[in-house]
Amino acid sequence: MSVVGPFGLSVRDRSLEADTQAGLTAVEDGLLEATKSDVPFITEAAQHLMRAGGKRFRPLLVLLAAQFGDPYAPGVVPSAVVVELTHLATLYHDDVMDEADVRRGVASANARWGNSVAVLTGDFLFARASHILADLGPEAVRIQAEAFERLVTGQILETAGPRGGRDPIEHYLDVLAGKTGSLVAVSGRFGAMMSGADESVVSILTQYGERLGIAFQLADDVLDIASDSHESGKTPGTDLREGVATLPVLHLRAQAEASGSAEDRELCELLTGDLGDDGLLGEVLRRLRAHPALEQARRDTLRYAAEARAMLAPLSEGSAKAALEGLCDAVVHRAG
């Protein structure tokens, strides 16, 4: 049994392991090439987050999905580069919107060079992804455009907040389906489609990817509160400090409203305070870690991971299917 890629997926099949490792190496080469510019400063900025690491979760899914067709088909690795470039571009923009100082354990681009450079660097990465897409055909361009529309819509919905009378938790899950699920769904879709897999397989892996993407983000929500050292490079409580109402916080608010508990209301009040104060943040984290709302968020993560696994049932048994099931397990493991 070997561990493949920064995400840490365990693979038991040597042939699949070799294919996946070779594919990930080719993706890294493709990312390096795609982020180069004739202007050295642009190259430095564009490669800043890429060189900082990352799980390469989306490219890994592309490569595994391609195992249901021809994994060596010429469009597989370029499509994996496209989804990772798109993901990287959104990180540059997200850090500007969130005024984040750290990403993947290094200074964010906006903290290092300012908001304008960070936004334009994200745009540069989107442009490079589009250039690669053009060589993959009009269908690939359409799929990516639809996913990007969903991604941006999810971000706008998050910024606008739920409409009056809308359940905030349902709204939040819709936001995640757009912001995170859409691009992970495209990863499964591109891998299967570029490899020439049957349409039924393409559909299954698209739906699997969407659910897995939501589970992946929910695991991050849990880790932001439960982890002592956040594996994304962010310190615990980063989302709380930035005022992001993640799923555990939304469950806390719902339980406070339902029960009327003075203790729950007090904790909700603390969340609106100055969490830039380390002492207050530590107190909030301590109380949230012991609160049933965190366990409810874990259960939601498990539910989406289980739904992703269930989508794989019609696929033929083999090492590729087992690896996709392993991704579900890896997401669950991250959430504890």
Image: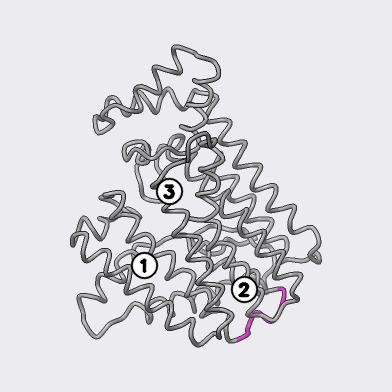
Disc 1 crowd rating (10 Å Cα; few below 14, some 14-19, many 20+) is some
The magenta span reads 68-73
Dot 2 amino acid type? Gly
Do the numbered discs 3 and 2 sit on residues whose CB atoms are within 8 Å?
A: no
Is residue 72 magenta-colored? yes
Question: Residue 253: horizontal and vertical position, in percent?
Answer: 47, 26
Q: Quadrant of the C terminus?
A: top right
> Which residue lies under the disc numbered 1?
50
Sequence-wise, the earlier of marks 1 and 2 is 1
Mark number displayed over residue 191: 2
Q: Seen from this angle, which residue lies furthest top?
A: 262
Horizontal side of residue 233 vs 186, given as left or right: left
Q: Main secondary structure of the magenta part?
A: loop
Sequence-wise, the earlier of marks 1 and 3 is 1
State which quadrant residue 23 falls in: bottom right
Dot 3 amino acid type? Glu
Q: Pick the residue in front: 99 or 231.
A: 99
Do the numbered discs 1 and 3 sit on residues whose CB atoms are within 8 Å?
A: no
Q: Quadrant of the N terminus?
A: bottom right
Tell me the residue at 36%/27% (across/down): 271
Q: Pick the residue in front: 319 or 65.
A: 65
